[in-house]
Amino acid sequence: MNYQHKNLASGRWRALSFVEQMANIASEVERTLNWKAKHNDVYSQRAFERTLELMDLTVETARGYPKLKELCRLREVLVDYFLGENQFKFNETALRKYFSNFTYAARRNY
């Protein structure tokens, strides 16, 4: 696989805590939403591809069924929201609120 986050994929991602991983995913989701709002489909698509890449790296490192289940459901929601028909009826505000908790927690740990 051709990773955009080569440094993270080579093993550094595993060294991050779950909260740090989710905060990094949050950054990519924010970028995706911001580019989508600016109607820049190319940059939005690229940011979303990076989001999925980080989600997949996080799924690979997940331990425990509840965490894995949550990550897989989240990935499904993101794909549905950005590429599908939004069957889950998510909106930008809900996505930002969900991910802001991880960003806050990651910053608080520093």
Image (tube, rainbow, N blue to C red):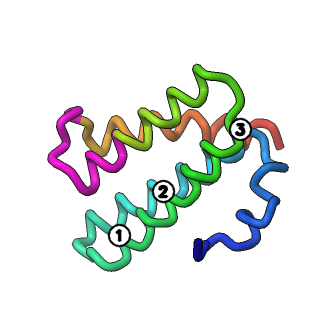
Tell me the mark number nearer the camera, choosing from 1 and 2.
2
Residue 101 location (% of width, % of height): 56, 33
Looking at the rendering, the stretch of residues picked out in magenta corresponds to 77-89
Q: Which residue is mark 2?
A: 52
Instruction: Return the residue nearer the eye: 81 or 66.
Output: 66
Residue beneath the point at 58% across and 30% down: 68
Q: Are marks 1 and 2 in contact (CB under 8 Å)?
A: no
Q: Residue at x 32, y 79 (%)?
A: 42
Give the secondary structure at mark 2: helix
Return the disc, 1 or 3, that comes first in the chain's sequence.
3
State the CA–CA distance, disc 1 to disc 2.
Answer: 12 Å
> Quarter holding the N terminus?
bottom right
Q: Element under label 1?
A: helix
Quick one: label 1 or label 2, which is nearer the N terminus? 1
Query: What residue would you read off at disc 3?
Result: 18
Q: Which residue is mark 1?
A: 44
Q: Quadrant of residue 29?
A: bottom left
Could you tell whether 83 is left or right of 58 in the image? left
Image position, residue 67 (x, y; %): 60, 26
Q: Amino acid at mark 1?
A: Ser
The mark lying in front, picked from 3 and 2, is 2
